[in-house]
Amino acid sequence: MPIVVQKYGGSSIETIEKIRSVANRISERRKKGYEMVIVVSAMGKTTDYLIDMAYQISDSPIEREMDVLMATGEQVSISLLSIALNEIGIEAVSYTGPQLGIKTEGYHTKARIAEISDDIILDAISNGKVVIVAGFQGVNENNEITTLGRGGSDTTAVAIAAKLGCPCEIYTDVDGIYTIDPRLYPSAKKLETISYEEMLELASSGAGVLHPRSIELAEIYKVPLTVALNVGNIKGTVIKELDKTMEKTAITGLAVDNNEAMITLNGVPHNIKIIADIFAKIAELDINIDMISQTTPVNKLVSISFTLPKNDLTQAIDVLEKYKEEIFTFSYETFDNITKLSVIGIGMKSQSGVASKMFNILADNDIPVHIITTSEIKISYVINPEDQQKAIESIAREYNL
Amino acid sequence: MPIVVQKYGGSSIETIEKIRSVANRISERRKKGYEMVIVVSAMGKTTDYLIDMAYQISDSPIEREMDVLMATGEQVSISLLSIALNEIGIEAVSYTGPQLGIKTEGYHTKARIAEISDDIILDAISNGKVVIVAGFQGVNENNEITTLGRGGSDTTAVAIAAKLGCPCEIYTDVDGIYTIDPRLYPSAKKLETISYEEMLELASSGAGVLHPRSIELAEIYKVPLTVALNVGNIKGTVIKELDKTMEKTAITGLAVDNNEAMITLNGVPHNIKIIADIFAKIAELDINIDMISQTTPVNKLVSISFTLPKNDLTQAIDVLEKYKEEIFTFSYETFDNITKLSVIGIGMKSQSGVASKMFNILADNDIPVHIITTSEIKISYVINPEDQQKAIESIAREYNL
């Protein structure tokens, strides 16, 4: 029988009623002749609740123990789903990440899957069982419990599908991938298919449905990935390798990120070493600088703007203040209220002029742009939040999104 | 440095505040120069909450998955306590039962510890860490998560102390072992010491402070066991081998059990095979028959009374009804409201006449007795619940309990 990996997120199993309903879905699918591996997250807001308890005790709880704590969330889910399946006559068996030998490397709370053994899964399948796996967790080389960070359960599901060489279905509370988040643009169109590459850029640019790591992994191992609604039978979106049946549109999707801030440094000497040094000092704090633009020098001084996660703004300002005191003086401005808007399309590779056409659209609509960066299949803009809706609508109209 | 194992039950760590307070206790003790291994239960009513979720899904949730579910309770506790200790500068590290290699045998939800390795514990101790262990859980030969049943965390603590050859301290919400439960008899005296043997009989007879299995284990491995209050520095009770300093009182303690029911069978042929057969059919259902008494035969018919856990009464009645239909007829009466009162004392071994003196006390106070059973250091009585208080008071007065 063909194998399929399904993943159900926290909102799909946040109540006992929903767990029962997921069990029924699995049962129906199984009766159609599938071997099934089910990856689940923690129920609803469980992880937040666990984290909150830890922070009541400490402002900086040690990460090894945070992993021990957070891993319990998925463990509750697997046992309850397995009980629900067995209750309706579907033999099921649950495994935690450590039990399944999901080996990870890297740091606690943001480990990466290094190795998965499929022995236990295949053994259970050959005994006629549905296999329920705790997502988001694994075990490191010291036999310590680890967690995979945000989006970790998606990554677990894709990694298992990669190992088994089977497709992966991610069930969630949206019914697929849209050209634009429908909450921002209600007439956005649902995509039937999208390439890994485009989906990765969309996800990295603020489209929150899937975590970039899971898409990367799916791309590497060519795992067909379906995103669909966790109730009913509405067809979702398939993320797969680009093939001839897929239209190479100039712009496939548009993503908006409101979680970035911008800093502009003024009067910085036009000296690559100094600039590199400032960025290095910020990077030391694990702050991820995203977009960067630099003016042409005037009197050997330049202005530099860059974006960074809003949460890291205070820390970055501390670095700059210290730098001003110790090294040399410059002025800076911070903007904690910006919109980063990105358009993504595999067609950009072959169609020239997308950037300039986009630029015209924004200019025609009197939308000032603070930073632009371009990559092979993506163009990102920093604009003012008050222009966000106007920008989305004019681009969507032009490109029929 | 000397090692000590401490165990904190669910009520000792039911809130974040209490977890902090336990961390402070551990810190104080550590500063006195002890290596410490701390065993914890699930916080407060967590286990009940988890069980309740499972029963919302199924009337008979499969036990393998119940173990996966319940084991999360202790895992939350160990991580939070470890975070709390590290927060106040005490290096600590947590381990689940499976991580520590606590190997179990027997059934899910009531497994028994078969083997403990102390490698990981000793290694962590030699690295200057306080070791936090999830009680109540282990792993079976198939690498499945198991739990130890009621009182399991006490058993984990004693088993680790046995392996390490060190004393074990059980912290709870009572300040020691009393001659009689102070809720039943407020002027009961706290015992400074008690022998394993007496404590085991007390615990088996309804004194709920410790689980009999943990006492058995302590006795086998001669682990000195202290039961004390989880706050302050009140001296608790030490459970240890009988030695010359301990007074061999005729009666050391009195225990009351209100969770038993009694069944009396009338008109049963005086035939050992039939009687054995009835009991065997009840035992097949895993029902634990405790006290048994039989009248002398009249017309070759006897009456038999026996006690069993109140929860199992309905099941036992089903067996009897079926037996009546299929084999032969007899009448029976059930009493779901009885008191089982037991007096325990190592001195009974050497002092004769305790049973008859006890009998006189009950007779003098017009307390009818339905069943009596005696063992080397215990006498148990089934009496009417309305006589319970009178019986306790008259025995306590006579034996200065």
Image: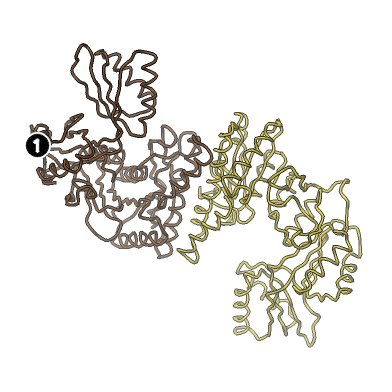
Chain colours: A yellow, B brown
The percent position of residue B382, horizontal first and vertical second, equals 22, 33
Q: Which residue is mark 1?
A: B364
**In this view, A209 is above or below A5:** below
The residue located at (36%, 31%) in the rendering is B312
The residue located at (62%, 56%) in the rendering is A150
Neighbour tally class for label 1: few under 14, some 14-19, many 20 plus, Cα within 10 Å? few
Question: Which quadrant of the figure has residue A205?
Answer: bottom right
Q: Return the residue nearer the eye: B207 or B12.
A: B207
Position of A154 compared to B331: left or right? right
Give the amino acid type for the residue marked by disc 1 in the picture: Asp
Q: In which quadrant will I find the N terminus of chain A?
A: top right
Question: Which quadrant of the figure has residue A260?
Answer: bottom right
Q: Return the residue nearer the eye: B297 or B45.
A: B297
The residue located at (65%, 85%) in the rendering is A328
The percent position of residue B12, horizontal first and vertical second, equals 35, 55
As helix, strand or loop, the secondary structure at mark 1 comes to: helix
The percent position of residue B323, horizontal first and vertical second, equals 37, 17
Judge whether residue B328 can be spotted in this image: yes
The residue located at (67%, 41%) in the rendering is A5
Q: In which quadrant will I find the C terminus of chain A?
A: bottom right
**In this view, A381 is above or below A167:** below
Judge whether residue B350 can be spotted in this image: no
The percent position of residue A85, horizontal first and vertical second, equals 59, 36
Chain of the residue under label 1 = B
Question: Which quadrant of the figure has residue B140?
Answer: top left
The number of numbered badges drawn on the structure is 1
Q: Return the residue nearer the eye: B119 or A76.
A: A76
